[in-house]
Image (cartoon, grey):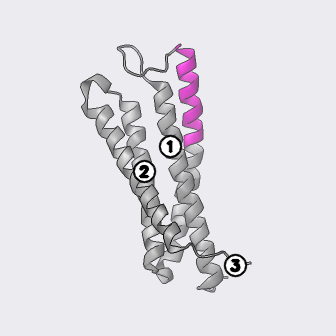
């Protein structure tokens, strides 16, 4: 059974979703790094990581829409591996942040003097996991589409 090619409307939705992910990740990075009242390095860096993986997913969608199949099919392996190993790292980081927040008796409000905001950092770890999963999923899907439909790879 051959995988189906996504429709033009579905590709537009994927582009828009990835663009929103990039913009939100950058906004979180700027907000939690530049605003003194909200300063939290953990949240800012995980927001930036989320934006980075959303950007990689956007690149995968753009390359699929352009249709550069001869070279791109081999590069998708790298994106599959990056997405997979980042998912593993994010699961570990999520558990660590939840345990740190619970052992330090933190509240859910990340903005006060002693609170490091580990709960909110765990939310952005989850967002980074989600974008790395999307990168893995779409890279694998597009590669499977290319190998079954366009390229004869043994």
| Foreground pick, 106 / 82 | 106
Would residue 80 appear left or right of 66 to someone viewing this image? right
**Does residue 76 appear in the picture of this structure?**
yes
Distance in Å between CA atoms under marks 3 and 1: 31 Å
Look at mark 3 in the image and give the residue it sits on: 2
Would residue 79 appear left or right of 34 to someone viewing this image? right
Would residue 4 appear left or right of 32 to someone viewing this image? right
Asked if residue 95 lies in the magenta stretch, the reply is yes
Residue at figure coordinates x 35%, y 14% from the top left: 113
Look at mark 2 in the image and give the residue it sits on: 21
Where residue 73 appears, as percent x and y from the top left, is 53, 76
Q: Secondary structure at mark 1?
A: helix
Main secondary structure type of the part rendered in magenta: helix
Label 2 near label 1: C-beta < 8 Å? yes
Which residue occupies the extreme right position in the image?
1
| Label number found at residue 55 | none
- How many numbered circles does the render carry? 3
Residue at figure coordinates x 55%, y 41% from the top left: 90
Asked if residue 145 lies in the magenta stretch, the reply is no
Look at mark 1 in the image and give the residue it sits on: 127
Q: Secondary structure at mark 2?
A: helix
Label whose residue precedes the other's in the sequence (3 or 1): 3
Q: Secondary structure at mark 3?
A: loop
């Amino acid at each position: 059974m051959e995988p189906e090619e996504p429709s033009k409307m579905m590709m537009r939705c994927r582009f828009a979703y990835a663009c929103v992910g990039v913009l939100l990740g950058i906004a979180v990075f700027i907000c939690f790094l530049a605003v003194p009242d909200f300063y939290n390095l953990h949240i800012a860096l995980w927001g930036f990581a989320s934006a980075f993986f959303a950007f990689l997913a956007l690149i995968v969608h753009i390359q699929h829409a352009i249709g550069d199949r001869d070279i791109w099919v081999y590069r998708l392996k790298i994106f599959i591996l990056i997405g997979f190993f980042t998912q593993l790292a994010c699961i570990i980081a999520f558990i660590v942040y939840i345990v740190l927040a619970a052992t330090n008796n933190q509240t859910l409000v990340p903005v006060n003097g002693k609170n490091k905001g580990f709960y909110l950092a765990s939310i952005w770890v989850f967002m980074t996991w989600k974008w790395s999963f999307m990168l893995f999923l779409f890279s694998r899907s597009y590669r499977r589409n290319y190998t079954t439909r366009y390229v004869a790879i043994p």
